[in-house]
Amino acid sequence: MAGFLALILSSLWVLLLLGGCHGEELEFATSVDTSDIAALRSFAAHIRHDPSGALRSWRRDEEACTAWSGVECSWIHGSQGFRVVSIRLPKSLLEGELSPRLGLLSELRVLDLSANRLSGLIPDEIAQLPKLRSIDLSSNRLVGRIPTGNGNGNSLRSAAAFAGNPGLCGWPLDRECPPSSIITTKKHYSSARRALLQDGATAPSPSQSPTPPSSNGSEAPSPSAAAAGSSPRHKGRSRARRWGIGAALGVIAGSVSGVLVGIIARAGIIVYKRARAKNGPIIFFHKLTPKMLAFLDSPESFQQMPLLGAGGAGKVYKAVLEGGMEVAVKRIPIQPPEPPSSSDASRSSGKGSFGKRHTVAEMETLGKIRHVNLAWLYAYILKPDAHLLLYQYMPRGSLQDVLARVRDGAMELEWSARQRIATGMVRGLKYLHYDCSPKILHRDLKTSNILLDEELEAHLGDFGLAKALPDGMTHVTTQVAGTIGYIAPEYHQTCKFTVSSDVYSMGIVLGVLISGREPTDEFFKDFPGGIVPWMCYLVQSGQELRGIDPTLLKPAARGGGEGGGDDTLGQTPGFANLDEITEMKRAMRIACLCTKLNPQDRPSTKDVLVMLNPGKLENVRPMEELLRDG
C-alpha cells in the first residue's frame, strides 16, 4: 500500500513539472489567464447597453489579449498566461453595473471607466485590488459609499476619480454618507457576494458537538471499551504505526524520484528547444505555423518580396503569408567573428555557442511582450548568415518615412497627429522601462524605429535588439550601439546605457517631431552642437515658434514674416489656435528636459507622459515641478 501511494505521488510530481514546462517551453501562448478572462466576460455581461460598440470586439470564443479592445496585458513571471494590467474605456457610453468579479484581476494597475453611464454601487472587490494604482470612475451614475482602498498605497485617494457621481458619498469626497446609504449598501450585495456568504460553513450546535478527542488525537474510548481487550488494540496500533512509517518512506522516495524525473524531462525539453532554434522558427504568434514560414528557407525568397526599407540594421521586406496575412520580415546579417589571437584562443573557445544561447533566450523574452505601442514580434529564425525577425506589418511605414513625405509636400501631418505619435512613443517606452520584469532598454530609439499603422498610432520596433543580437549589425555607429544623433553623451563616453539614455533618445525624437528636422540635417551644421543646443537656445530666449516645423503653419501665413517670441502669442495667424501654440512650445521644453547633459536631471517616461498630456493622466509629480527651469 505504501509503495502504491509513493508511485501515485511520484507520477503527480512528474505531471506537475512537465505541465509547468509545456506551456513555457514548447509553446508561446498569447492567451489571457483564465481567471482574468472570467473577470472580463463578467464585466461585459453586466453591461446592458453599448451604443458606441466599445465592447464589440470582445469575442467570447477568443482568449488572446488582442481580442479585448481597451485592455492591455503583460506577461507576469509565474503566470499561466498574459495578465490584464490596464482597462481603459473612457467616454464609451456604457450602461450597466460594475461586476464584483473585476476583483479577480490581481495584476490590474489602471482602471479608467470615466464618462460612461455606469450605475449601482462600487464593489468592495475593486477597492481591494492589490496592484491598482490608478482609477477613474468620474462622470457616471454610481451611488452609495466609496469603499476603502487597498493597503499598498491607497489608490482611491483622489476625489477627481469619483467626481460627477452625485449619488456617491464618503472619503475622499467632501460628502458625508447618511445612515440610509449604509443600509442601501448592505441591501445591494451582488449575487456573487451573496452566494459566497451562503456557501460558508455553519457552526455546529451544542447538541452536535463531537466527542472530545484524547491526548493522542483520536477519540477517547469509553471505559467499557478500554477494559474490553487492551492487547488486541495495542497490536492494532503497532501495525498502524508500522504502516505509517512505511508510507512516509515511500512518499519521500517517490517525491525524490519524481523530482529527478521532472528535472531530466525539463532538461530534455530545453535541449529540444535549442535544437529547434537552430533548425526551425521560434513562433510567438498563435496564428503562425512553421509550414507558413517554410518559404524563407529558399535564398531566392527575398528576391521576390517587396523591399520596404534598408539601413544599417539590415533590410526589411513585406511578405504575404498563406491566408493573406501581411508581415514584415527583417533580415539582420550576422557579423563574421574576428579571428582570436593566440593569447585569447583558449578564452574564446565556445563563445559562438554561448552567443546563440544568449540570442535565443533574449528573443524568447521579446517575443512574449505585447503592448499596443510596441511592434509585435511574431517569429524568430536563426540562419547561418542572418537573423530573421517577423513583425506585424505597419502600412504607414516609419515615422522617418512619413516626415520625409511631409517635407516633400506629399502629405500633411497636423499637430494633433504628431502629439498622438509622441504620446504613443512615450507609452511604449514606459511599458518597457516599468511594466516588464526585468526592465527592457530600447538602446536604439529613433524615427526609423517608430512604426505607424493606418491610424498613425506609434509602435516601437527593434526594442532590445542591441542586447539580444550581439553578433548582428543592428546599428550605424562607431563603437557603441545606437544611431548617430540619437546617442546619449554619457553612453558615448562611458559605454554604459541606462534608462536615462533611452529618455535622451526620446527627447531627440520629440524634437524631430516638432521641428521636422532630423539631427543629421544640413541645417544644424551652421549651429554648433546640433539639434539639442539649438532647441534649448530657442526655449531659453522665448523664441520657440522659430523652431516649429513650417508645415504646421496655415498656407496664408507662410508668406509672411518670421513670427517672433511670446509677445505675438495668440496673434500669430499661422496657427490653428492658442491651445496648439501652447502645446507645441511645451513639447519643445519637454524635449530640452529629456536631453539635459546630466542623466539625473532628465525626467522619467512616467513624468514625460504627464507633461505631454496635462490634465488627462494621473500626475506622477506636479506639472509645475516637472517643467520648472526647463
Image (cartoon, grey):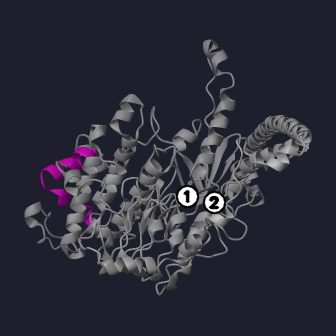
Residue positioned 47% across, 41% down in the render: 476
Q: Is residue 360 visible?
A: yes
Q: Is residue 343 above or below residue 155?
A: above
- 506 in magenta: no
Q: Is residue 342 above or below residue 377?
A: above
| Magenta segment | 530-550
Q: Is the C-beta separation of discs 1 and 2 under 8 Å? A: yes
Q: Position of residue 357 (x, y in %)?
A: 67, 36
C-alpha span from label 1 to label 2: 8 Å
Residue positioned 27% across, 62% down in the render: 549
Q: Which quadrant holds residue 360?
A: top right
Q: To which residue does mark 2 refer?
A: 30
Q: Is residue 57 left or right of residue 160?
A: right
Residue positioned 74% across, 60% down in the render: 289
Q: Residue furthest top?
A: 343
Residue positioned 88% across, 40% down in the render: 230
Which kind of residue does numbered mark 1 sit on?
Arg
Asked whether 451 or 369 is in front, the reply is: 369
Sequence-wise, which precedes: disc 1 or disc 2? 2
Q: Is residue 518 visible?
A: no
Q: To which residue does mark 1 refer?
A: 370
Q: Position of residue 451 (x, y in %)?
A: 48, 60
Q: Position of residue 19 (x, y in %)?
A: 75, 51
Q: Give the main secondary structure, helix, strand or loop, of the magenta stretch.
A: helix
Which kind of residue does numbered mark 2 sit on?
Thr
